[in-house]
Image (cartoon, coloured by chain):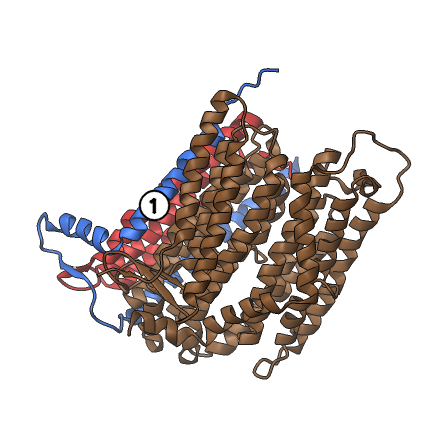
Amino acid sequence: MNREKSKGFAIFAFAIIGVVLAVFMIFIATYRIMQYGATFPKPVMSGRQLSRTTDAGGIINSMSGFIWDYRSFDMIMQTPVLLATAIGCTAMLRVIRRKR
Amino acid sequence: MLEIQVYIVAVLSLLIIGLYCMTFKSNMIRILIGIEIILNAANLSFIAFSARFSEYVDILAQSIVVMSIVLGGSVIAVGLAMVVNAYKHYKTLDVKELRRLRW
Amino acid sequence: MDLIEFIPYTLIFLFIGAVTALTVGIIEERLGKGRVKEVLSVIFIALALGGVLILYREIEPSGVILFSIIKNPPLGSCLEADRLSALMAFSTLFLGLFVGVYSFSYMKHDTRLGEYYSLLLLMMAGMVGVALAGDFFTLFVFWELMCISSYVLVAFRKETWGPIEAGFKYLVMSSLGAVLILLGMSFLYGMAGNVNFAYMSVGINWGTAGIWAYLAFILLFIGFGIKAALVPMHTWLPDAHPEAPSPISAMLSGMLIETGLYGFIRVFFVVFMPNTVLLPNGSETFKYVFAVFAILTMTIGNIMALLQKDIKRLLAYSSIAQIGYMLIGVASGTTYGLLGCFLHVFNHSLMKGLAFLASGALVERVESRNLDEMKGFGRVMPMTTMALTISLLGLGGVPATAGFVSKFILFGSALGPGVNMWWLTIIGVLNSAFSIAYYLPIIKTLITKSTESSPQLKEAPASMLIPMCLMAVLIVVFGVYPQPVLQLADGASKALIEGLPRYIAKIFP
């Protein structure tokens, strides 16, 4: 009984020390990223599609227009992905009763 | 819009939370939710990088996020179909019971 | 305003084939009989293979061709095909043709076959799309198509507990890899402003990128490495491959993990590699990282394979070791090393595919995967055992098989002029010799005379024998006369390293 209690106590102590160390390292990592992250590079080349954020009600239309103009191939290729999901789910969830 | 490093810290902490959820939880559905958390981290990262400029927004990233939500949903659908089948065999949702495939 | 220089016939035929196989499958299931869907799917795979040959003909003049609709890259999504993409698509469909013919009688007694064939065709469409993609997000959409189909196909025989457990572990690890790829893609997008490969190659300010480039590299390496079964991210593979049906094991081990490796090679050699001189300690770091992972993968794959008694699990660990050999070619970074890598991709798909198909035929007749229960059955099934022997000798790198040629080029590339990694060559050769130690006992177990005889064992049916014998003949032919495949792989590796300015000039003329 005493051995079990001391073993449980040792595991408990290790867990507490591990959690404290992990939280401490997360704080240090956050501080370093906040210091260092100001140098995240800005893109080099210009000529990108930008849109004003003050377009009230216009951003949804311009986004749909953007997707159908520039990203239509990705949108069309999502149809086979949804087809594969549907076929996969019916294949996994169907119950076939064989007549023996 | 705050500076970019705040958002990077948020993305990396969501990544760590998602990895913790996938590693240390034993319920199968919680593991699938861990995948969703990391997917949300990636989506947040796209949106944060798209809004770095004052008074303009880059809508390429936002269209990528719209499409990636659909892909994440289908992966979870197939995963849940597999969880239903696993429950029929093992009668439990504990992933520690899925230990019969050894060596 | 379109920029259609080629039409992707391959993808069109595979998608039409998937829908057709599903509808015909539903009709035949109502009727209760009929084998039309198998024949239709094999016809569509053959048509798609013809589409790849047309693609090769169209790439001939310029080397890179584009396909995009409504608006142009770099902002629009595009398919950019060069000789490397064509080689990966060709390998996929070549193996897929044999797998389709083999599944004719292997899956005869299974239910839900309409879904099986349509998912097989969709998985192949996903793999071809990953090879052809010119934009990172297009690659991701096709990647998810390939992954989702493979999750369901691994867990296809859901009546027993084995495939479900293996399928769930595979799903969790592989989708973790996919979302890590998305996270790495987002960091590269933040640095570049666009997700096009050619744009990211020239549009990143590497001087100020510093640690963020390394972070994106680590995320992409882990994400693609989970799918490519690099150690220590390989743990899903020895569970998923034995439990999947044998033709799907052949497809998984023959092309799926190589497609993962291809994705990583494409991203690394187009985006990171030309600019490594601008990163602090750039080029040396990457070479040594790849070399360390190559050694780790080869060694652990070979050692773990020695301890297995299950034939398909042994072949699964052997796949991990073969990916390690391919990483040696990537670590060298030269055109010669990548020639060995791509040649080994094609040869390994043939050899490992044949090994899984032949062992599947054995497992189906013997009703068990354990090697100890297969004593002497080689004498009852001579052609299957002969095919298995040829594939195992090829995997071990015996001369006069295709495996020898590609392994020779791979191990020789680490000794090249700019690459002084003689220790990598020595460890590679030792591992290759060591792998014979677990291939030969399989052959020995099969051909020893056994005391008991089981009368119900016959040779495998014809539709399983024909693809196996054809693949065995091809392995020997390509070992003695490797010129055709050498030319294909040579074009592929030159298109990646020396064709990079042409690749970028397509988007920014």
Q: Residue at x 37, y 48 (%)?
A: B39
Quadrant of the image containing the C terminus of chain C: bottom left
**Residue linked to disc 1:** A78
Residue A31 visible in the snapshot: no
Secondary element under disc 1, as helix, strand or loop, is helix
Q: Residue at x 52, y 48 (%)?
A: A15
Name the amino acid, label 1: Gln
Figure disc tally: 1
| In the depicted structure, whether residue A63 falls above or below residue A100 | below
- Nearest to the observer: residue B11 or residue C456: C456
Q: Residue at x 42, y 56 (%)?
A: C181
Quadrant of the image containing the N terminus of chain C: bottom left
Chain that appears blue: A
- Nearest to the observer: residue C380 or residue C164: C380
Q: Spot the residue most to the top.
A: A100
Residue A65 visible in the snapshot: yes
Q: Spot the residue most to the right.
A: C451
Q: Is residue B15 left or right of residue C409?
A: left
Q: Is residue C417 left or right of residue C472?
A: left
- Nearest to the observer: residue C303 or residue C249: C249
Image coords of residue B69 (percent x, y):
32, 45
- Nearest to the observer: residue B74 or residue C51: C51
Chain that appears brown: C
The quarter of the picture where residue C63 lies is bottom left
| In the depicted structure, whether residue C83 falls above or below residue C386 | below
Image coords of residue A31 (percent x, y):
34, 64
Image coords of residue C229 (percent x, y):
56, 55
